[in-house]
Amino acid sequence: MRTFISTLLLIFACHGLMANEAAPLAEDPAVEQRLITISEEMRCLVCQNESLAGSRSDLANDLRAQIRTMIKAGKSNVEIRQYMVDRYGDFVLYRPPVKPTTWLLWLGPFTILLIGIIGLLMYLRQRNTSMDSKTLSDEENRRLDVLLNTVETEFKKDARP
């Protein structure tokens, strides 16, 4: 038991040695707020489902530092956004602009939905048409009457006490 407790204490004591370097505190809260506003609209290029503001990748840290530098240099949000688009393309934006290269992105889901609806309507129409056209021939009607009469006669025989 002493060995187990000693091992746990040693692990907890060493845990502090493995801690990462603390993030620097914000020098200017206004700059940091503007940085967060800008970086929330941008995609992390490493963790593609996270915003630049929420990602912890090294590249995201570098890009936030670069944005912070540009904010301190007096660049506007539009200039910073344009710089990022020029460098990394529209992929860096969560809401890319509507232009010929992004038409598929904006119109693709609606086109696929429309094709699906048209396909479903064509299938239902074809199914209804094929179900209506099934009529029995005279021979089939005659055989059906014979079978029904036979069943009815058998039923009446069994129903008598």
Image: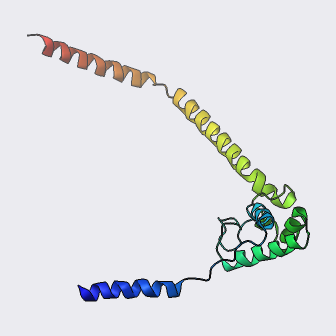
- Left or right of 75? Residue 24 is left
Say which of 113 and 134 sits in front: 113
Q: Residue furthest left?
A: 161
- Left or right of 154? Residue 69 is right
Residue pictured at 35% horizontal, 22% vertical: 144
Residue pictured at 69% horizontal, 49% vertical: 112
**Which image quarter holds the C terminus?**
top left
Residue pictured at 80% horizontal, 67% vertical: 31
Q: Quadrant of residue 46?
A: bottom right
Residue 26 x %, y %? 73, 71
**Which image quarter holds the N terminus?**
bottom left
Q: Quadrant of residue 67?
A: bottom right
Image vertical order of residue 107 relative to residue 17, above or below: above
Q: Residue furthest top?
A: 160
Say which of 80 and 127 sits in front: 80
* Number of marks in picture: 0
Residue 140 x %, y %? 40, 25
Image vertical order of residue 92 relative to residue 5, above or below: above
Image vertical order of residue 8 relative to residue 75, above or below: below
Residue pictured at 73% horizontal, 48% vertical: 111
